[in-house]
Amino acid sequence: MFDTTNIQPAAPKKGTSSTRNACKLCAPLGASLVFKGIEGCVPLIHGSQGCSTYIRRYMISHYKEPVDIASTNFSEDSAVFGGGQNFVTGINNIISQYHPAVIGIASTCLSETIGEDVEALVRDYLNTNGAENAPLFFNVSTPSYSGTHMNGFHQACIAAVKRFAVSGLRGRHLNLFPGFVSPADLRYLKEVCADMSIDAILFPDYSETLDNVHTREYQLIPTGGTPVAHLEKTGLAEATIEFGTVFNRSVGRQSNTSSINSAGQYLEEKMEVPKKPMPLPIGIEASDHFFKVLWDFSHRPIPQKHLKERGRLVDAYVDAHKYVFGKRAVLYGEEDLVIAMAAFLKEIGIKPVLVASGASSGIMQNALAGIFGADHDIMVADGSDFATIREMMPDLKPDLMIGNSKGYYIARELKIPIIRIGFPIHDRFGASRMHHIGYRGTQELFDRIVNALIEYKQESSPVGYKYI
C-alpha cells in the first residue's frame, strides 16, 4: 500500500529553486480567460509587459486565436513611485484603439507588492475624465503568489457578478457557471439547454471569442461573450448550477482572505440565488447527475438524442473494456478536472496511481477518498511540480499519462502514451474543439484514451498488426 498522506514536493537540490517546472499557471491568466468570456471586454494587466506577454503566449498557443491583452507596462520607476500614470495612459490607449464596452483589470505580483489600489485608480480616472461615455470597469486582485490560474479564474468570476448582478424580482432563468472548460464544452452546454428549453445564462462564455469563425477583417474585439445585460440578471436567477469541487468548498491553504470562493456562492449568500454545485460532468454517473438537475429545474423530459448518446456511450464501455481495464494512469492538472477525471477513470476500469496538481487546496485527498474509499492507495501530490512528478513515476509503472502538454517530456522519457486534456495544449491542434463533458464529450474522451492505448500496443509490437 502506498502512503495516502499528501505527498509534498521533494526538497530542492542545490542550485535549483523550490518549484521546478510548476504544474500550474499564473492567477492573472485565469482572470484574463474570464475577461475574454464577457461581451465587448478588453483585459488589462496592471503590471509589467512581461506578464501580459506570458498570458498572450499561452492563450494564443492553446486556442490558436489572436488574443489581445493590454498592459500598464510597469518600469523600474513605476515599481518605486507607483503605476498611476501608467494606468491612465493604458486606459486611454485601450479606449482610443478598441472602444470597449468593458475593461477587466487584473493585478499582478508587482502591483500588489507595492500596494496599488486599483479601485482608487479607477475612481480617480472617472472623476477626472467623466463616467458618461466611459466603458464599464471592474477589477480583481490576482497576485500569483496567492494561488494558481484557477484562483484567478474564480476570483474574476466573483468580481464580475459582484460588479454587475442586480437584485429584484426573481426570474425563471438558470445561471450556468461551468468553470474552466473548452469552447466546445461551452457550445455543448448551450445546445443542451436549448434542447431542454431552458433559459440559461452561461458565464463565462468564450466559446466564440476564443474559437471564432474566419473573418475577412481582423476583429479588435471578437464577437461573442456573456453580455453585461445577462450578467446583471444573474442575481435574479431561479438557481445556479456551478461545476467544480474545489471552489465549491473552502479553498484551504491557498484561500483568499474572503470567505467567498465562487460566483455561485456569492449569489447564494448575497442575493439568495440557490446554488447547485456538482463535479464536472465527465463520465456516465456525473452526466446523469447533471441531466437530472436540469430535469428537476425544467420538468421537461431529456431529449431522445441525449438518451441515445448515453446508450452509445454504455455500448462503447462494453466494447472497449478489454483495452482499458486494469491500466495504470498518472493524472495531473487543475484540481477540479483531475478529480472529475479520477471518477471517470474508476468508471471505465483504469486505476489512477498518481493524482497531481500544482494547486494546494488540500481537497484532493478527501475527494479521492469519496470516490475510491478511504483506504485507497493512490498517491496524491498537491502543490507539486513536474520535476517531482517525474521523480515519483518510475516506481509506479504507469501505462499512460493524462494531462496537459507540459507533461509530454516525461511521457516521452518513459515511453508511454499521453492523452492531452486541460490547459495548456501547445503541441497539438484543435484544443478549442476538444470536448470533455456530458455523454457526448465523455464518448470523445473515452475514444481518445482507448485509441491511444491501442496505438501504443500496436507500435510497440515486434510484428505489428492491422486488426484488433
Image (spheres, rainbow, N blue to C red):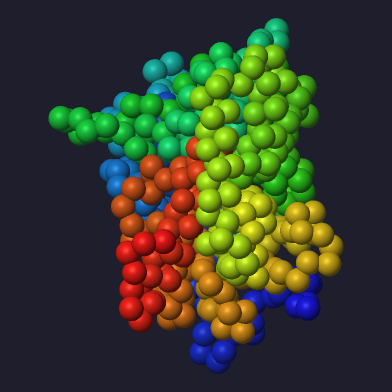
Can see residue 37? no
Identify the residue at the far front of this view: 467
44 above or below 99? below
Q: Answer left or right for 115 relative to 414.
A: right
Can see residue 457? yes
Identify the residue at the far right of this view: 374
Counting from the top left corner in percent of width and height, residue 137 is at 49, 30
Identify the residue at the far top of this view: 169
Judging depth in this view, the residue of 96 and 244 nearest the camera is 244
Q: Which quadrant would the N terminus be assigned to in this image?
A: bottom right
Judging depth in this view, the residue of 342 and 321 nearest the camera is 321
Counting from the top left corner in percent of width and height, residue 163 is at 59, 27
Q: Residue at x 61, y 45 (%)?
A: 283
Res. 439 image quadrant: top right
Res. 342 image quadrant: bottom right
Numbered label tally: 0
Q: Which quadrant would the C terminus be assigned to in this image?
A: bottom left
Counting from the top left corner in percent of width and height, residue 369 is at 79, 59
Identify the residue at the far left of this view: 216
Res. 290 image quadrant: top right
Judging depth in this view, the residue of 398 and 188 nearest the camera is 398
Q: Residue at x 73, y 31 (%)?
A: 276
Q: Residue at x 52, y 85 (%)?
A: 16
Counting from the top left corner in percent of width and height, residue 330 is at 58, 68
Q: Answer left or right for 111 relative to 350.
A: left
389 above or below 227? below
Q: Residue at x 57, y 74 (%)?
A: 398
414 above or below 242? below
40 above or below 112? above
